[in-house]
Amino acid sequence: MSQPIRSALVSVYYKDRLEPLVALLKQHGVTIYSTGGTQQFIEEQGADVTAVESLTGFPEVFGGRVKTLHPKVFGGILHRRHEASDLQEAEQHQIPPIDLVVVDLYPFEETVASGAPEQDIIEKIDIGGISLLRAAAKNFRDVLVVSSRDQYEAVTQLLTEKNGGTDLEDRRQYAAAAFAATAHYDTAISGYFKERANSQQLSANSSQETPLRYGENPHQAGTFRGDLDALFDQLHGKQLSYNNLVDVDAAVLLMQEFQQGKPACAILKHTNACGVAQADTLHTAYLNALACDPISAFGGVIIVNKPVDEATAQELNKLFFEVLIAPEFDAAALTVLQSKKNRILLRQKPVDFPQKQVKTLLNGVIEQDFDRAIETAADFKTVTDSAPTPEETEALEFALKVCKHTKSNTIVLARAGQLLASGVGQTSRVDALKQAIEKAHSFGFDLQGAVMASDAFFPFPDCVEIAGAAGIRAVVQPGGSIKDQDSIAACNQLGMAMVMTGVRHFKH
């Protein structure tokens, strides 16, 4: 049965396409309640309008922020016409029924997209409108809700065909559309605030800004927002650059894996380690790290986990590098290292790092937990006929730590306590392995008895076969390929040991 519309609340931001609907309401003698600019627009169409403030007995306040939020408005929409008690209360409080609600929402997304300042964006968060839509949609048994100007034509046609009335299924359909509109709207607002919150996280201590010489390239401006003084004392050298900071970040995260235990040294270039070593002395650790790739070490960032002594400083002083990070410097070492004017020396302080990584992407922000997982011998699952020896196991643990901090796809070749070579950032794991083998040979390393770590599984046995031919004797990888057994079988045939961890370490 068609239910006639006798009264309507019309309050819209966009008024285009509204004329035919207003004309139809006027034709059927519908009582129209409205506000502000919409009221003026309807009156210009020659229809009678009752101002909402006349209905409520209360004026618009706070610059229009509050105008429809009143019991006489929401009571008129929400009271149930089939409930005697609701009808009695409506009569007692002089609340007239409202059978049609025509409301669109402030253009929040459009305002955000325009690049408007935050104050303007906040003012486009609709409160009354979205509440009216939800109220009318909730009471669809008695009320028709129109939530978009895109519906005006269809609603006008519907009311024309049904002589100014609607059926229950008509109202249910439009209620569903209204709830979809409010859900989309709330999601957009939530996304905006989440992005702003993440931006604030990115801009933590935004009052502390360090201007950089430039960004990644000279034509790009750069700024660091954060408290560098909480992390480092800069003891010497020129101002840190954008690229310095990116490499310093990678270096600090890598050295966290070697914070305890023997003296360790890592040399990084473009965020990838070109040399990593542990030894009984820092002097030896540095020399072993440098031996891995002395060409790439030129102009790199170096980090150590122990105080720099004079003997190590004398060796370091022979190399041109951009940044050296250490927990402390002996006085004599500092004198040696400060002989080069622009060399940056950073004394690292203990500090807690964020638990989340945040990065701008496309027109938004992505966030993830830091990769804090690192697998040790206790996590290794031997899947081949032979298990790695204790020395190979130590080398596999070492290789996996380096592999975790190297760009994917990556293969790391190592011995216990020394990186021999790595293949980094390749689109093919086979190419990464070939690159690593070629680099190791070019710097005089014999790979007989070395080990290999992979950041992700082997989809085919080819990597194992190439590694075995080069002399690699043990492999660590996460596993998880449907063809794991092919790689295992290749290891068994070549007399190699393979362990799996079940944990992937992609680094994009």
Image (tube, helix red, strand yellow):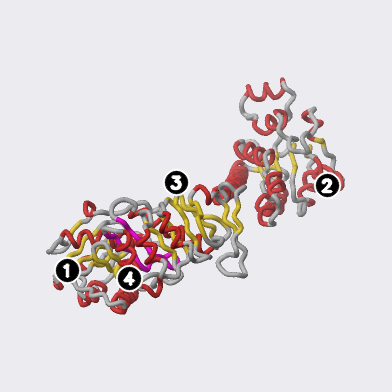
Q: What number is the disc on residue 41?
A: 2
Q: Is 398 contained in the magenta span?
A: no
- Neighbor class of circle 4 (other Cα within 10 Å; few <14, some 14-19, many 20+) is many
Q: Nearer the viewer, mark 2 or mark 1?
A: 1
Q: Amino acid at mark 3?
A: Val
Residue 348 place in picture, x, y as percent:
44, 52
In 3D space, how far apart are the residues under numbered discs 1 and 3 (Cα atoms)? 42 Å
Label 1 residue SS? loop
Q: Is residue 60 above or below residue 108?
A: above
Q: Nearer the viewer, mark 1 or mark 3?
A: 3
User: Position of 262 compared to 297: left or right?
Assistant: left
In 3D space, how far apart are the residues under numbered discs 2 and 1 (Cα atoms)? 83 Å
Label 3 residue SS? loop
User: Position of 147 compared to 429: left or right?
Assistant: right
Residue 228 place in picture, x, y as percent:
53, 51
- Neighbor class of circle 2 (other Cα within 10 Å; few <14, some 14-19, many 20+) is some
In 3D space, how far apart are the residues under numbered discs 1 and 4 (Cα atoms)? 24 Å
Which of the two labelled residues, at mark 2 and mark 4, occupies the earlier sequence position? 2
Residue 452 place in picture, x, y as percent:
26, 67
Which residue is disc 4 drawn over?
292
Q: Amino acid at mark 4?
A: Cys
